[in-house]
Image (spheres, rainbow, N blue to C red):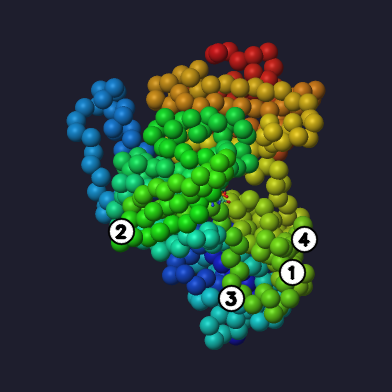
Amino acid sequence: MASYDVIIIGSGPGGYVCAIRCAQLGLKTAVVEGRETLGGTCLNVGCIPSKALLHATHMLHEAEHNFTEMGLKGKSPSVDWTQMMAYKDKTIGQNTQGIEYLFKKNKIDWLKGWGSIPEAGKVKVGNDTHEAKHIIIASGSDVASLPGVEIDEDTVVSSTGALSLKKPPKKLVVIGAGIIGLELGSVYQRLGAEVTVIEYLDAITPGMDGEVQKGFQKLLKKQGMTFVMGAAVQGVETLKTKAKVTYKLRKDDSEHVLDADTVLVATGRKPYTDGLGLESLGVEMTDRGQVKTDANFATNVPGVYAIGDAITGPMLAHKAEDDGMALAETLAGQAGHVDYNLVPGVIYTHPEVANVGQTEEQLKEAGRAYKVGKFSFMGNGRAKANFAGDGFVKILADKETDRILGCHIIGPAAGDLIHEVCVAMEFGAAAEDLARTSHAHPTYSEAVREAALACGDGPIHS
Ligand code: NAI
């Protein structure tokens, strides 16, 4: 039996970042992980592998659509699926081994196996029981099931199976127009699949700014994706190598059937806390199955904390990291803090979509007086040169004070551009502060400055 200051259960972005921070702050730390490799869902079967496939297939798209115009002639590349999978796996390996290196460097022990908490202050891993002053649940999330749909990770897949298909499908039906459905739908659409997305609501990407939802859907349709909106999937029947997806249109209750080689279920995720022994420990849960925590990530059981997807808030890797760092700092006697109003969201399609702060709909609902500054990437020289003129930057600012309240971007590198607005908002900046900041020419970031200018006397290039 070993004794620690902190034992963290789960080595995803929440758990491993928390562990490194704890170790940096002088706490003796261990992480329990039952997978063969560190990094959790994000590194092994989520963010990282999906970005590898998005990158590879975007390169293919560029070669097929834009090379000739740039004077790059020759045969379009063909797809070697085995090699693409190998590239994806290599990317995963580099990242998971990187975490192993960081654990060694920071003297963090990896307790291999699945952990449970038999009592406060104790963590059981296999036959060993370890002691810890603080126990942190960072066990993440799992795919939420859909009634009538059995995921076999072969024909009917979750995001995990969709990252390791035997071959790209010819016909893919995606259930759910959220981030997972649209990112992975884009991958296979670029590889030539006929992609149909079935969505229960009337708009894609729930919770996003309405204008972005509409603009983004229009772009995806232009790329060849088909959408069935306002439709509830009733069930999926798996035949030998094919599947039949039955859905009902909400407007008239009519029933329809779609054939597919592969069906991707992307209707959300749920907290994963199975096997931790939380019930017998008496840890309070929310009615949505999340571990209930206070503002300092403490559960009702003294010495037991939780972070990331297992608790409330957006299920995002970077939110889990922020939770992890704040908790480590609090446990080390510092003042850990996360500003949940300023956690950015990014969809890594092409073009990318990114947002931070309030949507126009939220401001309207709150009765807040606001102004909108918008700028199209068509007016950005760099974007035009790079075939990336689709999309816009939209900044929402307080009508009276000019303080930035939100930013919504569809466009090239949107996921990187959003961060200058995050920093500006952290400092309580006005749109004028962004507008008066020099932005190098020619960069995509000029579109952010132009949107800020549009909140005042007007942009230059439109
Ligand atoms: P989601 O919650 O983002 O979207 C699920 C969609 O499925 C919703 O639009 C919902 O209306 C629809 N839906 C639910 N039941 C349905 C039914 N029976 N028929 C038709 N449509 C139905 O969930 P998603 O995309 O699975 O992602 C899960 C989590 O992972 C999210 O919290 C997301 O933020 C996170 N994630 C984040 C990424 C990123 O930051 N780039 C990438 C991948 C996932």
Residue carrying label 2: 241
Q: Amino acid at mark 3?
A: Gly
Q: Does the CB distance between marks 2 and 1 fall below 8 Å?
A: no
Examine the image and state in which quarter residue 399 appears: top right
Circle 1 crowding by C-alpha within 10 Å: few under 14, some 14–19, many from 20: some
Asked whether the beta carbons under mark 1 and mark 3 sit within 8 Å of each other, the answer is no
Q: Which residue lies at the image location 43% right of the left edge and 70% below the top edge?
A: 36
* Residue 32, horizontal then vertical, whole percent: 55, 72
Quarter of the rendering occupied by the N terminus: bottom right
Q: Residue 9, relative to residue 443: is it above or below?
A: below
For disc 3, the neighbor class at 10 Å (few under 14, some 14 to 19, many from 20) is few
Tell me which residue sits at (68%, 20%) in the image.
455
From mark 1 to mark 3, how far is it between C-alphas? 15 Å
The amino acid beneath tag 1 is: Glu
Whether residue 324 appears in this view of the structure is: no
Separation of residues labelled 2 and 1 (CA atoms): 44 Å
Q: Nearer the viewer, mark 2 or mark 4?
A: 2
Circle 1 sits on which residue? 284
Above or below 184: residue 416: above
Sequence order check, earlier mark of 2 and 1: 2
Q: Residue at x 64, y 38 (%)?
A: 356
Residue 294: numbered disc = 4
* C-alpha separation, residue under disc 2 versus residue under disc 4: 48 Å
Mark toward the start of the polypeptide (1 vs 4): 1
Mark found first going from the N terminus, 1 or 3: 3
